[in-house]
Image (cartoon, rainbow, N blue to C red):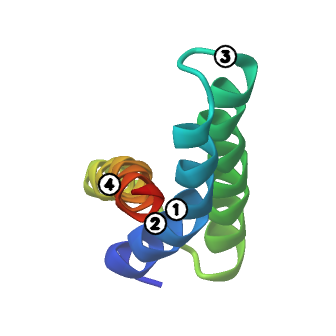
Amino acid sequence: MNNLTFAFLVFLIAFPFGFWRVKSRFKSRDWMLAIHIPVIFIILLRIYNKVHFHMGFSWLSVIYNLIAFMSAQFLAGLIYKKWKK
């Protein structure tokens, strides 16, 4: 599995949590959970990829994953705000 495929999976994992985050009050317990729970799933996915696909660590993959995670959270927030109107 290459870095872009993995980043797409990170996007798919973080996207639904972005809806939960935008509905929660800023820095509340739910808001913090909506940001940190997908990180657990992403770590588990990275471990799975290391074992089955022998995907090693690279700083480029970290950058791709961070961009995918942040854009999923941001895009879900935008969609929710537009949908709510």
For marks 4 and 1 on the same chain, the one whose residue lies earlier in the sequence? 1
> Would you name the residue on which mark 2 appears?
11
Disc ID at residue 28? 3
Q: Amino acid at mark 1?
A: Phe
Query: Does 22 sit above or below residue 64?
Result: above
Residue at point 25% right, 55% down?
A: 60
For marks 3 and 2 on the same chain, the one whose residue lies earlier in the sequence? 2
Mark 1 touches mark 2? (CB < 8 Å): yes
Disc ID at residue 79? none
The x, y position of residue 7, in whole percent, is 40, 68
**From mark 4 to mark 3, how far is it between C-alphas?**
21 Å
> Would you name the residue on which mark 1 appears?
15
Q: Amino acid at mark 4?
A: Ser
For the residue carrying disc 2, how many other residues have a C-alpha within 10 Å: few (<14), some (14-19), or many (20+)? many
Query: Is label 1 or label 2 in front?
Result: 1
For the residue carrying disc 4, how many other residues have a C-alpha within 10 Å: few (<14), some (14-19), or many (20+)? some
Q: Say which of 64 and 25 sits in front.
A: 25
The x, y position of residue 12, in whole percent, is 53, 71
Looking at this view, name the residue that lies furthest to the top.
Answer: 27
Where residue 61 sits, quadrant-wise, is bottom left
Asked which secondary structure carries label 1, the reply is helix
In screen coordinates, is 73 left or right of 64?
right
Looking at this view, name the residue that lies furthest to the front.
Answer: 85
